[in-house]
């Protein structure tokens, strides 16, 4: 049987245990905050949560410190969830997700640090010199189950990434990546298979 000192050291030395403890304490708030919030999930010290009433987080998902989760105001008129994060999804720190149309992150997807997923592009369509005051053009994004998106990758409007893919670090994805693909570069191109 471990001593009290051993148990205390285990909490001190294992940051994930602290994340689990914080997530248990914050669970009632998260359940009220999000459209759906699965059992044993954590959104740990997010940098930004906007439009949470249109975000679903599945069971056993861990979004680590600094996550930026936004469903943009034009999508709030929709009745269904606009951003869906599946079961068993893991995101390392400082990932950013912005949904104006639809983003679906299927089960068991893993993000490296600082991954960006944005389903819209700014325009100058209304004639304002600042893109923030003009309408956006958006297209749905899907990231297939079991996919690994490595550090600093960007997944852009209209991307459809298949099942069990690897998206290389610093890659930029727009368009379709077939199931079981390894894709790298800017723009991301298929260079191998995970089979």
Image: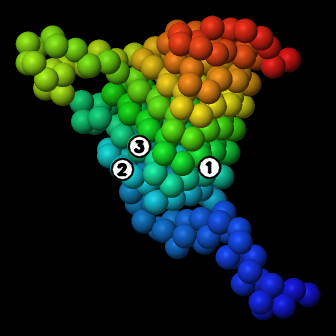
> What residue does disc 2 label?
48
Pointer 2: residues within 10 angstroms few (<14), some, or many (20+)?
few
Task: Work out whether residue 172 can be spotted.
Answer: yes
Q: Quadrant of residue 126?
A: top left
Q: Which tag, 3 or 2, sits closer to the chain's start? A: 2
Point out residue 49 in the picture as x, y percentages from the top left corner. 36, 49
Give the CA distance from mark 3 to mark 2. Answer: 6 Å
Left or right, residue 17 beside residue 118 = right
Point out residue 133 in the picture as x, y percentages from the top left corner. 13, 26
Give the CA distance from mark 1 to mark 3. Answer: 14 Å
Q: Which tag, 1 or 2, sits closer to the chain's start? A: 2
Q: At x 63% / y 45%, what residue is drawn? A: 90
Pointer 1: residues within 10 angstroms few (<14), some, or many (20+)?
many
- Determine whether the residue tagged by mark 2 lies in a helix, strand or loop: strand
**Could you tell me which quadrant the C terminus lies in?**
top right
> What residue does disc 3 label?
69
Q: Quadrant of residue 9?
A: bottom right
> What residue does disc 1 label?
61
Point out residue 70 in the picture as x, y percentages from the top left corner. 36, 40
Left or right, residue 107 beside residue 154 = right
Closer to us: 156 or 141: 156
């Amino acid at each position: 049987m471990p001593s009290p000192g051993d148990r205390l050291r285990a909490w001190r030395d294992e940051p994930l245990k602290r994340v689990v403890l914080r997530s248990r304490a914050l669970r009632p708030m998260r359940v009220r905050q999000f459209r759906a919030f699965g059992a044993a999930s954590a959104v740990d010290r997010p940098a930004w949560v906007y439009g949470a009433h249109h975000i679903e987080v599945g069971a056993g998902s861990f979004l680590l410190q600094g996550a930026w989760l936004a469903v943009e105001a034009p999508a709030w008129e929709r009745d269904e969830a606009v951003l869906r994060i599946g079961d068993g999804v893991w995101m390392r720190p400082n990932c950013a997700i912005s949904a104006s149309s639809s983003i679906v992150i299927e089960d068991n997807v893993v993000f490296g640090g600082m991954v960006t997923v944005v389903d819209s592009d700014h325009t100058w369509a209304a004639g304002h010199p600042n893109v923030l005051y003009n309408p956006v053009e958006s297209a749905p994004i899907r990231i297939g189950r079991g996919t690994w998106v490595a550090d600093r990758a960007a997944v852009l409007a209209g991307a459809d990434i298949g099942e069990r893919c690897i998206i290389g670090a610093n890659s930029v994805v727009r368009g379709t990546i077939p199931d079981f693909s390894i894709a790298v570069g800017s723009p991301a191109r298929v260079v191998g298979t995970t089979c």
